[in-house]
Amino acid sequence: MPAVFEPSGPVQGAASLDLPLDPGERVLWTGFPQRGLMFRPQDIFVVPFSIAWCGFAVFWEVSVASTKAPPFFLLWGGGFVAVGLYFVFGRFAVDAISRARTIYAVTNRRVLILSGLTTRKLQSLALGGLTELELQERSNRRGTITFGRPTVGAGNWGRSWPGSSRNAAPAFEGIENAQQVYDMIRRAQQDAKPPSAGQ
């Protein structure tokens, strides 16, 4: 008989979360990623790069404007300035809004990630198919649980570069009591396994 877990986070009704549950499937835990501004390890490289990019683009624009160059050069440089401003400021706003619209859930059968800025996207991972789980926990007990590995092409930019999140491995990012949730998922995995022959 499957063990009954005490949820480590507030469990909401499946209907309110828009979670399509199968017959007999139970929600064990729901949570959400860290809200507001959030820095990731790769920002050690992305932030200096974006500041340098933006600074050079602004310098270009000022230089072009001071020499009264053709408007084409101003427009060309303006595109680089816009990209630089996005990486210095805009991407943090987009990321914060995206995380504010993300909900995580664990059932007795699956891991679910409901996200999306303009359209809602549901990722469903069967507990029995999770062969790799990685836990990274900070001193405040917040942490990230990653399911599997990033696909080819994800590189070292993580979720900082536009579109790179499509290649990133699914994860519960910046959740509270990450160790407890990790342990709960491991126990749920054991209970989700079919009984061996002869039992």
Image (cartoon, helix red, strand yellow):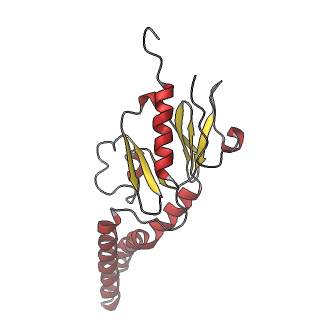
Residue 1 spot, x, y in % from top left? 58, 22
User: Left of 157 or right of it: where is 182?
Assistant: right
Residue 62: which quarter of the image? bottom left
Number of marks drawn: 0
Q: Is residue 101 visible in this depiction of the protein?
A: yes
User: Left of 129 or right of it: where is 111?
Assistant: right
> Along the line of sight, which residue is nearer the eye, 156 or 146?
146
Residue 23: which quarter of the image? top right
Q: Residue at x 54, y 30 (%)?
A: 109
Residue 182 spot, x, y in % from top left? 46, 44
Residue 161 spot, x, y in % from top left? 37, 59
Residue 47: which quarter of the image? bottom left
Name above or below for residue 75 compared with residue 27. below
> Along the line of sight, which residue is nearer the eye, 61 or 12?
12
Name above or below for residue 164 compared with residue 138. above
Name above or below for residue 33 compared with residue 45. above
